[in-house]
Amino acid sequence: MKWDVYGETVIYDNPWVRLTTVDVDVPGVGRIDHHVVRATGEVVGTVVTDPDRGILLMYRHRFITDRWGWEIPAGRVDPGESLRDAAIRETTEETGWKPLDVTPATFYYPSDGLSDQKFNVFTARGAEYVGPPTDISESERIEWVTPARARTLLTDGSISNGLTMAALLWTFSFG
């Protein structure tokens, strides 16, 4: 059933996120104010694979959940930037490896009952090392891991980041 929308009020707004209440009519329930987190830009993540090296991952800490884990390179799309260019830029900045043969894989909304944030997944076949990462705040270390190790990291909880999980599972299933 489609919910009817009667209006939206901004509660909080900044360049990264916007919190709103949306006046909606829920079938069988009636009108309610539903809180919505509006993203101010799309996100890209790239699974970089290489037949000799494996899969490019970053080990990093996320302060919000206070967890360490493995992730693919990812980040926000700059205004006016194409999704593909953002995938290349973010991977290069965060890892020092410029991805090659970059193609779109899929997209998804990680929490579409709460937020309109959109994640775009790309795959890259190979990468060229261009030097140390220019964005040094992103990770503790960068490694190429075998597909078998990446599967183990998925199953043992070492990968708990939703974008990374979805992207790797998509790649293992369809890539």
Image (cartoon, grey):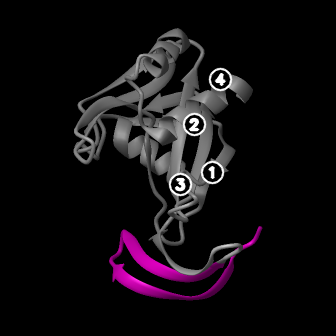
| Foreground residue among 111 and 125 | 111
Kindly report the distance in space between the C-alpha atoms of the residues bearing marks 2 and 4.
10 Å
Q: Quadrant of residue 175?
A: top right
43 in relation to 41, above or below = above
Kindly report the distance in space between the C-alpha atoms of the residues bearing marks 3 and 4.
22 Å
Question: Disc 1 marks which residue?
Answer: 108
Amino acid, disc 3: Ser
Amino acid, disc 2: Ala
What's the residue at 29%, 45% (across, down)? Answer: 134
Residue 166 is tagged as 2
Q: Magenta segment, principal secondary structure? A: strand
SS class, disc 2:
helix
Q: Quadrant of the N terminus?
A: bottom right
Mark closest to the chain's N terminus, 2 or 3: 3
Residue count near mark 3 (Cα–Cα under 10 Å), binned few <14, some 14–19, many ≥20: few
169 in relation to 99, above or below = above
Question: Disc 4 marks which residue?
Answer: 172
Which mark lies nearer to you, 1 or 3?
3
140 in relation to 147, above or below = below
Residues at circles 4 and 1 in contact by the CB criterion of under 8 Å: no
Asked whether 63 falls inside the magenta stretch, the response is no
Amino acid, disc 4: Phe
Which mark lies nearer to you, 2 or 4?
2
Residues at circles 1 and 2 in contact by the CB criterion of under 8 Å: yes
SS class, disc 3:
loop
| Foreground residue among 97 and 1 | 1
Residues at circles 3 and 4 in contact by the CB criterion of under 8 Å: no
Which mark lies nearer to you, 4 or 1?
1
Amino acid, disc 1: Tyr
Report the magenta residues as a range. 1-25
Residue 111 is tagged as 3
Asked whether 4 falls inside the magenta stretch, the response is yes
